[in-house]
Each structure stands twice: as C-alpha cells, then as structure tokens.
Image (tube, helix red, strand yellow):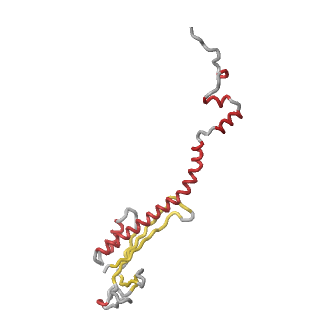
Amino acid sequence: MFYRPRNLHLCDRPLSGRLTPMRRPRRAWIGALVRDRRGMSAVEFGLAAPIFLAALSPVIDIGLAFSHQIRVNQAVEAGAQYASMNPYNPSTWSSNISSAVTNATTMSVNPNVGAQTCGCPNDGNTAIVSHDTATTCGTQNGGTACSDGSQPGYYVTISATSTYTSVMPYSILGSSRTLSSQAVVRIQ
C-alpha cells in the first residue's frame, strides 16, 4: 500500500524559501532583511536619479537656447542673402526680405528691415560709419568719398528677434529671454 508520512505540519518540516523569515523570531527577521541585497541598486537609482536630472536640466536648457539663437542667426542670414541677390526696390523690397527671414525658420521671429543708408567701412573694416544721405551717396551723386578714398556704398540693416521660453523656470535666468541677431548688407 501507500506510505503516508506522519509529520505533515509546518513546524516539523525544515524551513526554506519565502516562509523562512516569517517563522523566525522578530530580531532574526529584521536581520535577514538587513542582509538581503536584492533591489539595492533600484533604491540607489531612485535616490540618485532626481539629483542627476536636476543637474542635467539646466545643461539641456542652455543647449536648447543656443540652438534657438543659431536658428535666429540663420533666419537673418537668409534675409541678408536675399538682400544681396535682389536689386533694391523701395516698394516691395522690405516686405520680401521680411518674408525671407520668416520663411527661413519654423519658429516665430519678428524681422525688421532698416532703411537704405549711405556709409563707409571704418578703419578696421568691422563696422559701417554713416557718410552721406541716401540721395547724395558717392561722388557721382554729389556726395564725397570715404576717408580712405574709396566710394561709399548703400547698406541695409536686417535684424530679427525671437522669444525663447526655458524648459524649466530658473530664478536666476527667468522664464523667457529675447534672442536677437543683426546683419548689415551692402546692396550697391
């Protein structure tokens, strides 16, 4: 016949598996939990992740702001390229340049096209100095030559601004910044 073991009670069997800590005295149970290393890396990650993300967020935000500034610069460069490639026309020229600046990017920019001015490069060729009026620019129009003897030229200033809103508001930087770019183009 069949042999049936006599001791079927839990207290008579050896303890193993998940029931082991439950059958021990309370001090032994706490000691077993302290020695158990399962899940320790998850706890460490849970403690370190918010600190890491808090330190990483400003770096990401600064990178996005630089990217936004580069796109504003590229939009102004597109307007400057249009201005240098197309002859000056006082009626539609300014709106065409504004359209070139706006269409060069997908973000919201506010273009500004200045009036045509007469000017000469400074001694270091780093800036344009106003010279005559736009109607008397150059010796052929009744004006004077530049200080270095060269002919003055017609220049237009193209600028654009855009508002960058940060990912997270910082007390030092504020929540938004106005980014701007400017180009001076000789058109004749």
Horizontal relation, residue 165 to residue 133: left or right: right
Q: Is residue 32 above or below residue 85?
A: above
Q: How many marks?
A: 0
Residue drawn at point x = 66 percent, y = 30 percent: 22
Spot occupied by residue 83 in the image (x, y as percentages of width and height): 32, 74
Of residues 171 and 123, the one nearer the viewer is 123
Q: Quadrant of the C terminus?
A: bottom left
Residue 78 quadrant: bottom left
Spot occupied by residue 54 in the image (x, y as percentages of width and height): 56, 56
Of residues 180 and 37, the one nearer the viewer is 37
Residue 34 quadrant: top right
Residue drawn at point x = 71 percent, y = 31 percent: 25
Residue drawn at point x = 33 percent, y = 72 percent: 81
Q: Quadrant of the N terminus?
A: top right
Q: Is residue 125 above or below residue 178?
A: below
Spot occupied by residue 60 in the image (x, y as percentages of width and height): 49, 59
Horizontal relation, residue 32 to residue 141: left or right: right
Residue drawn at point x = 34 percent, y = 79 percent: 186
Spot occupied by residue 118 in the image (x, y as percentages of width and height): 35, 84
Residue 179 quadrant: bottom left
